Structure formats: structure tokens, C-alpha cells
């Protein structure tokens, strides 16, 4: 087994892990590359932030809002909102409700918008459609079930921004806490063809309202002129310090894990990923904090000794999730035991076979060829 000497990822996490002469893995190098490209610290960061805020205020002059913030109640989006108020911006906060909010998330969002004085637009997804999509993904045995939420959030935010004549969307993505994530743990969040293909095979409910990022929507986004601003990359961002600020200033409550403001995400990351796919997402999150100097490797390994889920909370979440999805324990166990499949076992956006449907019967042969080619490369 190959183990990185800097972060805590190994070849069990990524079979294609590569070390340099100093024992640093390709993910650590990726982090360094992302940091160099996106992070702007000190005076350079302050200057870029000031210039961008002036542009946002200039465009938003005489408008009701000058920016939009996607608000989940988690650390990153909450701090984006806190800084927006501090910087004098007039934000419209948008919350995407997919039916899985924890009580902490609901309270955090309430405290944030009330204390900061921002308006809140809550988009509630059609639950029957969304439930059917999640069940389809579970039955398909593909790894990235969170594609569904991320896909819908992206399209929803752009639509609401355009409806309110907002050019700037403030995002919470930041390199220092999110810079590392093995590629095969996720899938392309914007591939609407893949979502439709999986649902076609395993879904049962007609999708009339799900906000697909189809070609028409993507063309709309491209022509909209809307810009994403991830200004957390331009200021000091130490996770533990940020939590203390949010707790003190906004009565914010910690939910215990990255993106655990969602009950589904907590269950997916804490149980489904490690049990079915052998993936412990904490290793990527902790490795990022090691690379950004917020935690030592020794401390990360010590934290990893703790189970990803409190036993009592796991049982409560298990009962809640199965009831909400309408699954028996036996049905869910059967799903968990199904062989893992690749998202690319289904149609994908940009696929050769989508452009030439008559050749789709040859797809299984092509998949076998790719598998053989991959095995030869690995050996």
C-alpha cells in the first residue's frame, strides 16, 4: 500500500495515487496548484476583495439587491453571508430545500437572515420527484448521489439571480478546506444526460419540475453574464476560528461534520459511502486541512480513529431516512449489497453514443474495451 507522507490519503483511497521523490502524493500537489491559482493573501487579497466589492456595489446601485448567496446553514455559506454584511452588500439569500434539512440548519438559517437583515428566498423542490431520483440513484449503485442536489442548486441559483437582475453570486467554495477530493469519489455535477439515463432505468415518477441543466439552460447561463465570486479565497480562513465567530455573532450551532447540516448528507457520507463504496470522506477533508496548515498529520490520524458516526445518531438517521424514502430495512440492505456501478455505465453528456444513437448496442463492447485498457495501464 502506498501512503502519502504529508496528508493521510493512501492507495486504498485512490488506486492511482502517485508519490514524488519526497513522498508527497498527487493530491497534495493538486492542492498546491489550486492554492497558487486561487488563493490571494495579505495585501494582494485585500486589494482584490476591495476592487470586487466596488464592482458589485456599482452594478447593484439603485437595485434591490447587489448579490445573491446560496445559504445552506453550513460553515462556509454562513461566513459568506456574515462577511457580505460586514462589507456593506445587500444580499438576497437563497436556500435550496430538498427535504433533508436538519433542525440545526433551519435554526442557523433563521438566525443568519434575521441578524444580518437579509431577505430569504427558499426554493422547495418537488419532494416526490426528488425522492424518486434518490431512490433511482440508490438502486443504480452509483457513488455520487449528491449530484442531484448540486445539479438542482446550480440551476436554481442562476434562475433566481436572473429574475432579480443580480449579476454576482457569492459562493462558499474555498481551497483551504475543500481543495482535495479524489476524482473517482464524485461525478460531474452538471451532467443532465446521466441523471435522466439513471432515472429512466430505475425511476417511476415523471419528472415535470426538476431543474435540469439541459443545453437550453446551459446556454442561458452562458449568456446571462452572471459571475461567481468565491471571496473566501482572498481572506484568512481558519475553520475553527470561523466557527467561533459565527457562534458568537450569529448564534450559529455546529453540526459536527462537513456538510452535515443535511440529514441525508450526514447519512450518505457517514454510512453509505464507507459501507458500500469504501470511501471515508473525512480523509479528504482532513488532508486538505493538513495542506493548509490548520491541523497536523498526527492530529488528523487521531481524529480518524473516531467512528464516522455516533451509534445512537446513526440509528435515528437510519430510521428517519428509510421511513422518508419508503424503504424497508430488507430493501435497503439489498440495495447496499448490490455491486457498485460506474456513472459511465449509463449515458453521459457528450458521449459518442448520444450523438450516434444507432450505435448504442455497441456500448457494452466499448465498456469492456475501456476496462481492459484501464487494467493494462494500471499494470
Image (cartoon, grey):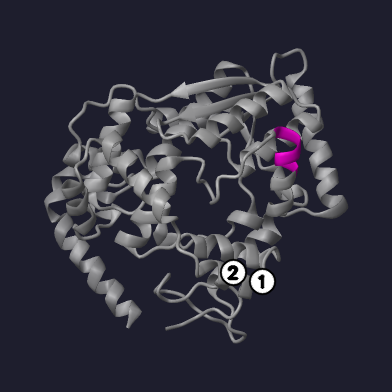
Mark 2: which secondary structure?
Answer: helix
The residue that disc 2 covers is 300
Range drawn in magenta: 245-250
What is the residue that sits farthest to the front in this orientation?
A: 312
Q: What's the residue at 85%, 44% (across, down)? A: 47
* For the residues bearing labels 2 and 1, Cβ distance under 8 angstroms: yes
**41 lies above or below 284:** above
Q: What's the residue at 62%, 75% (across, down)? A: 298
Instruction: Tell me residue 55's x, y (percent).
Output: 78, 30
Mark 1: which secondary structure?
Answer: loop
**13 lies above or below 41:** below
Instruction: Tell me residue 263's x, y (percent).
Output: 43, 41
Image quadrant where residue 326 sits: top left
Instruction: Tell me residue 370's x, y (percent).
Output: 25, 66
Q: Residue 352 carries which label?
A: none
Pick the front one: 143 or 114: 114
Q: Residue 296 carries which label?
A: 1
Amino acid at each position: 500500500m502506498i501512503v502519502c507522507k504529508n496528508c493521510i490519503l493512501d492507495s486504498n483511497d485512490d488506486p492511482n495515487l502517485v508519490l514524488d521523490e519526497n513522498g508527497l502524493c498527487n493530491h497534495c500537489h493538486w492542492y498546491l496548484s489550486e492554492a497558487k491559482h486561487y488563493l490571494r493573501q495579505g495585501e494582494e487579497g485585500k486589494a482584490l476583495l476591495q476592487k470586487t466589492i466596488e464592482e458589485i456595489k456599482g452594478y447593484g446601485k439603485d437595485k434591490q439587491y447587489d448579490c445573491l448567496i446560496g445559504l445552506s446553514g453550513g460553515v462556509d455559506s454562513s461566513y459568506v453571508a456574515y462577511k457580505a454584511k460586514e462589507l456593506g452588500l445587500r444580499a438576497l439569500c437563497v436556500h435550496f430545500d430538498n427535504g433533508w434539512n436538519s433542525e440545526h440548519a433551519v435554526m442557523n438559517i433563521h438566525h443568519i437572515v434575521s441578524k444580518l437583515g437579509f431577505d430569504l428566498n427558499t426554493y422547495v423542490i418537488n419532494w416526490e420527484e426528488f425522492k424518486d431520483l434518490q431512490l433511482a440513484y440508490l438502486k443504480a449503485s452509483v457513488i455520487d448521489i449528491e449530484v442531484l442536489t448540486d445539479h438542482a442548486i446550480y440551476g436554481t441559483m442562476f434562475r433566481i439571480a436572473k429574475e432579480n437582475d443580480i449579476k454576482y453570486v457569492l459562493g462558499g467554495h474555498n481551497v483551504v478546506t475543500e481543495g482535495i477530493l479524489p476524482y473517482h469519489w464524485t461525478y460531474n455535477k452538471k451532467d443532465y444526460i446521466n441523471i435522466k439515463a439513471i432515472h429512466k432505468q430505475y425511476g417511476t415518477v415523471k419528472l415535470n419540475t426538476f431543474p435540469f441543466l439541459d443545453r437550453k439552460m446551459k446556454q442561458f447561463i452562458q449568456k446571462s453574464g452572471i459571475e461567481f465570486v468565491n471571496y473566501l479565497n482572498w481572506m484568512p480562513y481558519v475553520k475553527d476560528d470561523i466557527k467561533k465567530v459565527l457562534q458568537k455573532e450569529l448564534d450559529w450551532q455546529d453540526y459536527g461534520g462537513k456538510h452535515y447540516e443535511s440529514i441525508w448528507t450526514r447519512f450518505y457520507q457517514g454510512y453509505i459511502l464507507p459501507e458500500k463504496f469504501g470511501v471515508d470522506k473525512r480523509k479528504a477533508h482532513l488532508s486538505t486541512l493538513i495542506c493548509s496548515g490548520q491541523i497536523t498529520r498526527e492530529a488528523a490520524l487521531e481524529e480518524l480513529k473516531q467512528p464516522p458516526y455516533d451509534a445512537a445518531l446513526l440509528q435515528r438517521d437510519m430510521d428517519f431516512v428509510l421511513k422518508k424514502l419508503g424503504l424497508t430495512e430488507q430493501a435497503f440492505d439489498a440495495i447496499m449489497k448490490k455491486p457498485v456501478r460506474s456513472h459511465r455505465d449509463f449515458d453521459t453528456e457528450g458521449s459518442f453514443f448520444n450523438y450516434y444513437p444507432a450505435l448504442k448496442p455497441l456500448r457494452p463492447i466499448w465498456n469492456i474495451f475501456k476496462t481492459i485498457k484501464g487494467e493494462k495501464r494500471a499494470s
